[in-house]
Image (tube, rainbow, N blue to C red):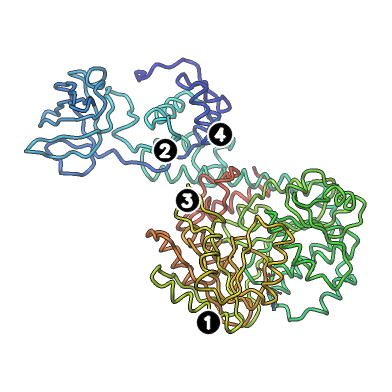
Amino acid sequence: MPIRYKTTSTSYSLSDLVTVLPEIGEKRAKKLSSIGIITIKDLLHYPPRRYEDRRRLTSIKMLNQKSECTLLLSVVKSRIVYTSKGITQSRIILTDETEKIEAIFWGRGYLANSVFQEGKKFFLFGKPEKYNGRWTITNPEYEEFIPEEENIHTNRIVPIYTLPDGISLRSFRRWVFETLQKVKIVDPLPSEFLQERNLVPLSEAITNLHFPNTLEYLEQSRRRLAYDEVVQIQKRWSKWKNTEFDKNACVHKTDGKLLSTFRSNLKFKLTRAQEKVIGEVLNDMSSPKRMFRLIQGDVGCGKTLVALHAILSAVDSGYQVAVMAPTEVLAEQHYLNFLNALSAFSLKIVLLTSSVKNAPEIRKKISKGEVDIIIGTHALFQESTIFNKLGLVVIDEQHRFGVLQRQKLCMKGHCPDVLYLSATPIPRTLALTVYGGMDISVIDELPPGRQPVKTYIIRKEKRDSLYKFIIEQAKQGKATYWICPSIEESESREDLKPLLNIYSELSNSIFLSLKTDVLHGRLSFSEKADVIRRFAEGKIDVLFCTTVIEVGIDVPHATSLVVENAECFGLSQLHQLRGRVGRSSLQSYCFLLPNKLAQLSAKRLKILCSINDGFKISEQDLLLRGQGEILGLRQSGESDLKFIDFSKDLHIIQQARDDVFSDKI
Ligand code: ADP
Ligand code: MG
């Protein structure tokens, strides 16, 4: 094959930096690093966003108006045209021996001389149009035809990538193409192993990811890369799991005084699902094998109560417990809830966040063993906290799955049992992948007497009736949460209704007769605690707040939840917010107030109106948005999930897990 582009004769290895490519210098390398491409391996594992099928080769005679096609043509004549506005144009007449067509390139006069030389042959791809009986094609994709040579941009299935400013699609595609010619990819997996699992070899998979010959090959390649992806994640889990620690973890008492008192003082009967999961958890706690368990359950199913069983069992056994929350606000709320739930006991419970003033003193107490339960953000645990006798770590994940990072805490010189709580129920396939080596318990039942929250989308013209409804409810002693996505006005997001504006606007007009207040993350801890307390005591009718209320606030007489800019939230997050109401046998309501309603968000919000089951909602969310967004993993840069498709890959995920955990790989 002739060499189309001038390249050096060396070959690349996957670990080389992208700067080994002749066209990539410091500047371009920096741009590429913004999309995670640093090495040749990253470049080759960067998935196209979509593909364009440019295989439909046709002749001018057969053209029909406005459908995309590829033509193979020779240049008859080319010229530069200077338009009145000073823009240049290339106008190229080409022919395929049946007829002629004129290609017009706006703003690219240079093409006429430097590229489209008379007599040369080109592939063009685009949408031809017929004016006055003549065919033209504007700004088509073009590529010279050289006999016996493979094309990159035309006459094939072509990859389209999402790229940073200043990196052109054509260049990037060419870099990938050239790299594929010059890199040697050694498959770490033997071919027999691959055959057994019906997986294609790695080099084939990577080549087809970018330049598939058929869409079927593409799917096979994606499956192979998805397999590798799961293996990588599972390996990280297994590395952590199969340590000596794992077999010599703390053995906790499960018949201690605190736990039995707590159990006999419970005001209600545990659900069957809670009993089952508590059984699983206490079984783990009492065994020398390290507990490593995820509790999944819909909002309101009573996960906190299960966690409290584990916590009291650890404290009964003389151990300390760390409770990690993803944000300060959530840590504060857990703190208040725990104080409340455990008020009957004389336990030392402390809050450790960066706004706590006497942190050094608290740390000293922790290290001396004068504290039983420590609640805080994971950052604070990681810095300089030394535990005296850490026996249990409870990790509250919410919808931010920083799983891999948080493992660090648990390594800290101890071998505590680990209990994850996930507030976002996720489908089994996803849980298996993201939570690799964990045991999973599901609480699939709500406490009795709960009524589904009635959920409505409220249009602008209906706001007045909503106000009336809220006032009516307040008269009956029922309270409302009014949620806004942002605290203050922001120039970049004019579409967002700011909390403080809405609060003062409504409190001073339509809600003048009601007791209102605000709650957001900028208040100090004691201010927040005070507002929450007054709300719980029924001294506030409408609480205007940000999503700080997402978790942990438990006020049974709050029966309405209003969400401004509902279109800005993820479905699972809205479901979680909705979990703040419906906490008693009173009928509760959720009102979604979208600002603008694009088609997709309308579809999403409607799901919420018709489905009350968190697992089903996250499945739907998954189908509509893709897993990365749900998990918040892609944004946080912790994601390896480029290729897995949870709607199709259950089999691959299970296979990869089995292979890792049976040490086959
Ligand atoms: P989650 O954290 O799973 O969203 P919580 O633990 O906050 O749910 O529990 C929700 C509410 O239900 C709390 O008020 C809790 O006291 C109450 N609750 C928990 N278990 C039961 C039960 N078995 N019967 C009645 N109420 C319960
Ligand atoms: Mg909870």
Dot 2, how many residues are within 10 Å of its Cα: few (below 14), some (14-19), or many (20+)? Answer: some
In the rendered image, which quarter contains the C terminus? top right
Instruction: Please name the residue shown 23% across and 29% down the image.
Output: 105
Under circle 3, the secondary element is loop
Q: Are marks 2 and 3 in contact (CB under 8 Å)?
A: no
Q: Residue at x 72, y 44 (%)?
A: 239
Mark 4 crowdedness (10 Å alpha carbons): few <14, some 14-19, many ≥20: few
**Which tag, 2 or 1, sits closer to the chain's start?**
2
Earlier along the polypeptide chain: callout 2 or callout 3?
Answer: 2
Chain-order first, disc 4 or disc 1: 4
Given the image, on which type of amino acid does mark 1 rest?
Glu
Q: Residue tagged by mark 2?
A: 161
Amino acid type at circle 3 is Arg
Give above or below for 149 relative to 138: above
Apparent side of residue 82 relative to residue 357 in the rendered image (left or right): left
Q: Which residue is mark 4?
A: 187
Residue 631 in the image: above or below residue 469? above
State how far apart marks 4 and 1 are (Cα): 68 Å
Q: Amino acid at mark 2?
A: Tyr
